[in-house]
């Protein structure tokens, strides 16, 4: 398999603090890959190494086979990055800002102009072409930030918290756009605090905690493996002498909590059994485990802390 | 080296200061005009000619050098520190540009501003006095070398500095005294033996001396040595600035 991004035993120390403890990543070309982890887990450090903002302590990393240190000219030209912290050049209006960014990557001015206009239109910023970043709202600044990552049309796009502080409408617009460009062949590496975002967009996620990858896989698989699903049935009255055979369950106040990995498939069987026991069912709710629960289980932390 | 990426960053640096011309070009025109009028026209008339050149003409090359030095240094140091503080330096560090390309782009921005200011001061001098430039090619050569040197130093200080104060420390406590003591307003020959010796270790003395030769055709000491000294500083500072960029000193973690 051809990989867009690989890291081998990648480590980074800040003084005595080990931010990354030998990370091995294999991100296939064309994938939509999510890196999840609590604050300080090492996500931004990993991205920094891939893009040349952080020096490696030991190990190596490469972009489409090009070493990020020894072949940095090639590796950096293949990546576009949108950093977590909003940053901007205060001197230039949006169109110039994007043209400059494209220019740094060696794109001719005329092509840079076309590309800048295309992206400004795509992100609904046509009316702000002559405006400077300072005058934009937070959501608009974020859009410009992402446009900067895309302006040289790189095959790999790294987005560090792209939807932080962005309203729901814009978030959905960005999701649609990112899904579209991923389908067109771009590899996307995303870090996010919104698990829903990772679940919805990513074909593979890795959970990173304290500088180590704790688990990697596609979201439904991880949930199936690590999560707990449940069918909750509220009944008219539960006679404690009755038993549900072959089910792992608890009863609290006439409410049955039945553990199952496949709630949708088990539901008819369960209801059938309850009807044989002559129990009157009042309400049935399926509670599916989410990636968030997997995350909390593995890291012991909520992602939003 | 002279690829589109490099030229784009140079373009950014030059357009940045041109957009801020009220801060970057006009002040040295005003201050040099004032120096020429106050020191040259009023006080200068009471001071005799130095090396057969009228006092007012004598100080103009030094004033041009002062302007070159300050502007070249200010441009690259402030551009660097600003891009560090606002973190948009990250947008530049993630691009394929090498340490040498990055440092020379910032240096060129400062060197262009320094040179433009130096030329403006000479033009003001020509308008207000009877100054006739001895050799324009030599003058350009000195202006470019010195502005490059101080722009490169500005990059180094800009990378190292953690606040604006540290930038102005150099201007106020180092460049200003060294420029004045380097013979902007007098000839070193007018000093007692001891101070003349001390002045010779001041690199700015050599730079001002060279510039005076280029513009007026007179000198205290070898103009060629002046050019060699300036070039040596320019090369050393450029080398150091490039290494700092490549290693990410204070700009990468």
Image: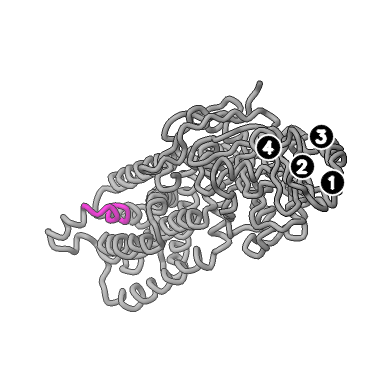
- The answer, for residue A193, to whether it is visible in the render is yes
The answer for which chain carries disc 3 is A
Report, in whole angstroms, how far the alpha carbon at label 4 lies from the one at label 1.
31 Å
Numbered disc in front, either 3 or 4:
3
The answer for which chain carries disc 2 is A
Q: Is residue B54 left or right of residue A273?
A: left
Upstream in sequence: badge 3 or badge 4: 4
Numbered disc in front, either 4 or 1:
1
Badge number at residue A265: 3
Upstream in sequence: badge 3 or badge 1: 3
Report the residue at 37% width, 52% height from top: B214
Label 2 crowding class (10 Å Cα cut-off): few <14, some 14-19, many 20+? few
> Which span is picked out in magenta?
B201-208
Report, in whole angstroms, how far the alpha carbon at label 2 lies from the one at label 4.
32 Å
Upstream in sequence: badge 3 or badge 2: 2
Mark 3–mark 4 CB contact (< 8 Å): no
Measured from the top left, where is residue A154 in percent x and y? 67, 36
The residue singled out by tag 2 in the image is A242
Front residue (pair B129, A81): A81
Badge number at residue A223: 4
């Amino acid at each position: 398999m051809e990989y867009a991004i690989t890291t081998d035993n990648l480590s980074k120390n800040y003084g005595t603090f080990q931010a990354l403890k030998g990370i091995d990543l294999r991100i296939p070309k064309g994938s939509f890959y999510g890196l999840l982890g609590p604050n300080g887990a090492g996500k931004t450090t990993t991205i920094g190494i891939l893009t040349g903002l952080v020096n490696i302590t030991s190990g190596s990393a490469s972009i489409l086979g090009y070493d990020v240190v020894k072949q940095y000219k090639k590796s950096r030209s293949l990546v576009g990055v949108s950093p977590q912290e909003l940053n901007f050049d205060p001197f230039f209006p949006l169109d110039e800002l994007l043209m400059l960014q494209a220019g740094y990557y060696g794109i001719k001015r005329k092509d840079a102009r076309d590309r800048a206009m295309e992206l400004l239109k795509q992100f609904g910023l046509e009316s702000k072409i002559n405006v400077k970043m300072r005058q934009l709202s937070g959501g608009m600044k974020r859009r410009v930030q992402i446009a900067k990552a895309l302006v040289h049309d790189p095959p790999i796009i790294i987005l560090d918290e792209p939807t932080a502080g962005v309203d729901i409408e814009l978030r959905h617009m960005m999701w649609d756009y990112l899904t579209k460009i991923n389908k067109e062949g771009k590899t996307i590496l995303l870090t996010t605090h919104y698990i829903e975002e990772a679940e919805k967009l990513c074909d593979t996620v890795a959970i990173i905690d304290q500088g180590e990858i704790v688990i990697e896989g596609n979201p439904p698989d991880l949930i199936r493996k690590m999560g707990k699903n449940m069918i909750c049935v509220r009944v008219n009255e539960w006679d404690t002498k009755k038993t549900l055979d072959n089910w792992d369950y608890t009863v609290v106040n006439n409410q049955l909590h039945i553990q199952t990995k496949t709630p949708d498939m088990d539901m008819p069987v369960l209801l059938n059994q309850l009807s044989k026991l002559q129990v009157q069912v009042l309400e049935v709710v399926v509670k599916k485990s989410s990636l968030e629960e997997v995350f909390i289980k593995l890291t012991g932390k909520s992602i939003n802390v | 080296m002279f690829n589109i990426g490099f030229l784009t960053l140079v373009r950014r640096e030059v357009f940045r200061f041109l957009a801020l011309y009220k801060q970057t070009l006009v002040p040295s025109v005003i201050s040099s005009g004032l120096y020429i009028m106050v020191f040259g026209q009023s006080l200068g008339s009471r001071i005799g000619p130095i090396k057969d050149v009228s006092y007012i003409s004598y100080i103009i090359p030094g004033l041009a050098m002062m302007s070159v030095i300050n502007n070249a240094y200010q441009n690259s140091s402030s551009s660097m520190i600003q891009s560090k503080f606002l973190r948009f330096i990250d947008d530049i560090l993630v691009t394929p540009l090498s340490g040498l390309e990055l440092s020379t782009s910032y240096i060129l921005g400062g060197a262009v501003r320094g040179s433009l200011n130096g030329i403006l001061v000479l033009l003001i001098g020509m308008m207000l006095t009877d100054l006739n430039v001895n050799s324009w090619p030599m003058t350009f050569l000195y202006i470019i070398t010195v502005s490059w040197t101080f722009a490169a130093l500005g990059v180094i200080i800009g990378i190292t500095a953690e606040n604006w104060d540290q930038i102005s420390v150099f201007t106020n406590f180092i460049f200003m005294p060294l420029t004045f003591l380097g013979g902007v307003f007098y000839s070193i020959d007018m000093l007692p033996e001891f101070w003349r010796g001390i002045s010779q270790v001041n690199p700015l003395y050599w730079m001002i001396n060279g510039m005076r030769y280029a513009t007026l055709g007179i000198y205290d000491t070898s103009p060629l040595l002046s050019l060699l000294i300036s070039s040596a500083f320019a090369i050393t500072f450029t080398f150091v600035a490039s290494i700092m960029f490549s290693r990410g000193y204070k700009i990468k973690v």
